[in-house]
Image (cartoon, grey):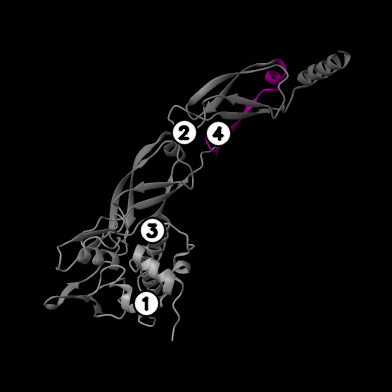
Amino acid sequence: MSIKKDYYEVLGINKNADDKAIKKAYRKLAKKYHPDINPGDANAEAKFKEVTEAYEILSNPEKRKLYDQFGHAAFDGTGGAQSGAYGNAGGFEGFEGFNGFNGFNGAGGFHGGTYRTKNGNGYQEFHFEGGDMGDIFENFFGGGFKKSGFQNDFKQTGGFGNQQHYQTKGSDIHAEINVSFDAAAFGKKETIHLKDDQGKIQALEVNIPAGIETGQNIRLKGKGSPGYQGGSAGDLFLKVTVKEKPGFKREGQNLYNTVSIPFITAVLGGDVTVQTIYGNVRCNIKPGTQSGSKLRLRGKGIVSMKNSSVYGDQYTTVEVQVPKNLTPSAKQKLREFEDACKAA
């Protein structure tokens, strides 16, 4: 005989957890193990049933009180508390059970069954398919049970005593996209083509936001897998890889490049043209500038995705050109220059 796990352990919460913590834990686990997310995974299906059963007990104050007092015996017919569990605590004297499955069985959640409740004329039956126990109980008992489903993931249609059909949101899709350096820096609308499992190619227009970096995602709402029974479609997440740009290196919002200057300019100073992604700019070189020195160009980096008025900087490393193939006269002048420097 299998031993049921402690409901608090199943949801990963302590015995002092409040309603909010119970609901949060359930939603996280239910989404993780839901059969729609794990098709054909028997272990995930069993986990889904287990966490749903635990939530159905712990989310109801009266049931939770009984569970804390009697444990599983309060509900499985093995303890003395069973006879009064529903008649005294919650007013469910006519609770008869669910036909069509044993306990919380049924693939993919609760896909079918019959609920019977006792009244003055005998037994009244309600047939249902789909959904979860919390939603079913709420229909029958006018809100006496809390909903256990996924907010915004399930939408109920139909009335009391009728078959209940549920719409489920489609799964999200993850893909990758390569973006040019300039498109990531300035933003751009591009058309991409994706192939689905059936080989059908779909063209989508994607808005590349200015400032996006490698590793970030672009979300296309409603472009994921279609929902079930008319439910909303999932989303498409595109993981971005930004291509390199010759002559530039990007780190966050800052850019790095190099500029070569003549030896005489490094010695005497002067102006030099520096390339930026926004066009060429003229920079002043101070006399005696050494190779490896850096020029900081404020605001010539990448725009911030969060604030379009904020830009990074560009840092340009100076490389001094060493003269080659000097004429005898030029060599003589350099020797004279060297002697003059020593004399100084």
Earlier-in-chain disc, 2 versus 4: 4
| Relative depth, front residue between 77 and 256 | 77
* Res 261 seen here: yes
**Mark 4 or 1: the one toward you:** 1
Earlier-in-chain disc, 4 versus 3: 3
The three-letter amino acid code for the residue at tag 3 is: Lys
Q: Tell me the distance, in whole angstroms, between the alpha carbons under discs 2 and 4.
A: 13 Å
Q: Which label was assigned to residue 81?
A: 1
Earlier-in-chain disc, 2 versus 3: 3
Inspect the magenta stretch and tell me whether residue 124 lies in it: no
Tell me residue 61's x, y (percent): 36, 62
Earlier-in-chain disc, 1 versus 2: 1
Q: Name the residue under label 4.
A: 255
SS under mark 2 = loop
* Start-end of magenta stretch: 248-268
Q: Mark 3 points at which residue?
A: 23
Earlier-in-chain disc, 4 versus 1: 1
* Res 104 seen here: no
